[in-house]
Amino acid sequence: MAAVLATWVGSAMFVGGLVVLFHRWTHPVSSFGWFAYAPLSDTVFTPGLSPALVVGSVLTVVGAALGAFGAGMLIGRRSR
């Protein structure tokens, strides 16, 4: 039962991570912002790693690992 649950949860996390990453790649971070805001007007805005990219990557990797673990447990299970 735990292997089936791990497979489903891992698959859901993997798909969720792919959705977050796909959304991040199709809707990139804006290269403009509050440029008229006085305290920040002297620095150049360069977007780095966004939280969406980090969360999507983590969800995809953890989901793939959990799904692979569950699938391996289901395939390698001994018959009684």
Image (cartoon, helix red, strand yellow):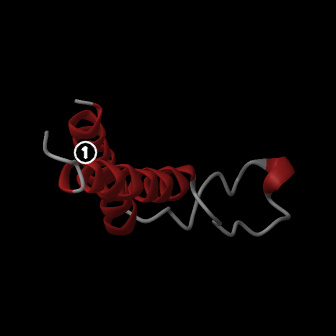
- Extreme residue in the front direction: 80
Q: Amino acid at mark 1?
A: Thr
Total numbered circles: 1
- Extreme residue in the top direction: 1
Tell me the residue at 68%/69% (across/down).
46
In this view, 43 is above or below 19: below
**Left or right, 42 with reference to 57:** right
Q: Secondary structure at mark 1?
A: helix
Indicate the quadrant where residue 4 lies: top left
- Residue highlighted by disc 1: 7
Q: Residue 36, position in %: x, y?
A: 70, 53
Looking at the image, which is closer to me, 78 or 21?
78
- Extreme residue in the left direction: 79
In this view, 31 is above or below 78: below
Indicate the quadrant where residue 6 lies: top left
Looking at the image, which is closer to me, 49 or 55?
55
